[in-house]
Amino acid sequence: MTKIIALTNQKGGVGKTTTTVNLAASLAALDRKVLIVDLDPQGHATMGSGVDKHELEASVLDVILGQHQISDAIINCPKAGYDLLPSNGDLTAAEVELLDIKQGRERCLINALETVSSDYDVVLIDCPPSLSLLTVNGLTAANGVLIPLQCEFYAMEGLSALLDTIEQIKTSVNPDIEIFGILRTMYDGRNSLTKDVSKQLRDYFGETLLKATIPRNVRVAEAPSHGLPVTKYARLSRGSQAHRVLAKELIRRLSL
């Protein structure tokens, strides 16, 4: 059964898109059929997959607004190993146009995904770093949430706000949504603050805190400029290996 996973954090700069792209490539390398939905107007997951966001014939915007079939907008990314529903800056228009939809505006994405989701083992939704109608669409479509989190002081405050948002989604439009895991990114186990935040997360969330961690790694930072996941750009790097460990943990945890 297809698992639809929203990667979200209302705080920017936590490695959300990097995790989406590299997790997708790692799952694909383990023989899972993967679709990335780039729901962020910045289009970074699109560019990081080797697709020029400025030359799209159709995008997630067209799909959400019902102007194109989702199958016409999905692009195969052979170098990365997965399929992509791309995005660009035009997606900012969706915020205004979705407001004009009186009923079911939070279900535009899930309605579109229903026609193709069974073709995939995993759908990863890269949500924007804000609480918007786009994020609400992503959370409404998802079976569960993966939360990338940087181990710093302000991250805990942001996490609390995000959990409140997920609870509101659960109460109002998606009662089955779960938190599939909290992922520590830009991780440095030698840092005392990292250790302190990790302990707080472990004490509060228990098994929801993933064992896998994603370290700071220059190869991970370089890979998007080459339009490749780090698993393809620098296969033996620490960053690449960490994402493979993450993929294997999620496969076990979610029976992917």
Image (cartoon, rainbow, N blue to C red):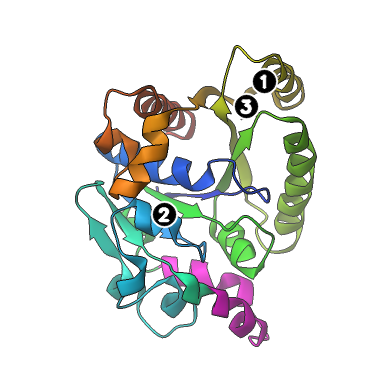
- Looking at the image, residue 11 sits to the left or right of residue 64; the answer is right
Q: CA distance from mark 2 to mark 1?
A: 27 Å
Choose top left, top right, bottom left or bottom right for residue 230: top left
x and y percent of residue 76 in the render?
Answer: 24, 59
Asked if 48 appears above or below 131 in the picture, the reply is above
Q: Is 112 part of what is drawn in magenta?
A: yes
Residue topped by disc 1: 194
The residue lying at 61 percent from left, 61 percent from top is 135
- Answer whether labels 2 and 1 touch (C-beta < 8 Å): no
Q: Nearer the viewer, residue 161 or 231?
A: 231
x and y percent of residue 57 in the render?
Answer: 30, 78
**Dot 1, crowdedness within 10 Å: few (<14), some or many (≥20)?**
some
- Looking at the image, residue 66 sits to the left or right of residue 14; the answer is left
Asked if 16 appears above or below 67 in the picture, the reply is above
The residue lying at 42 percent from left, 79 percent from top is 62
Residue topped by disc 2: 45
- Answer whether labels 1 and 3 touch (C-beta < 8 Å): no
The magenta span reads 92-114
* Amino acid on which disc 2 is placed: Ala
* Amino acid on which disc 3 is placed: Leu
Residue sticking out furthest to the left? 78
**Dot 2, crowdedness within 10 Å: few (<14), some or many (≥20)?**
many
Residue topped by disc 3: 209
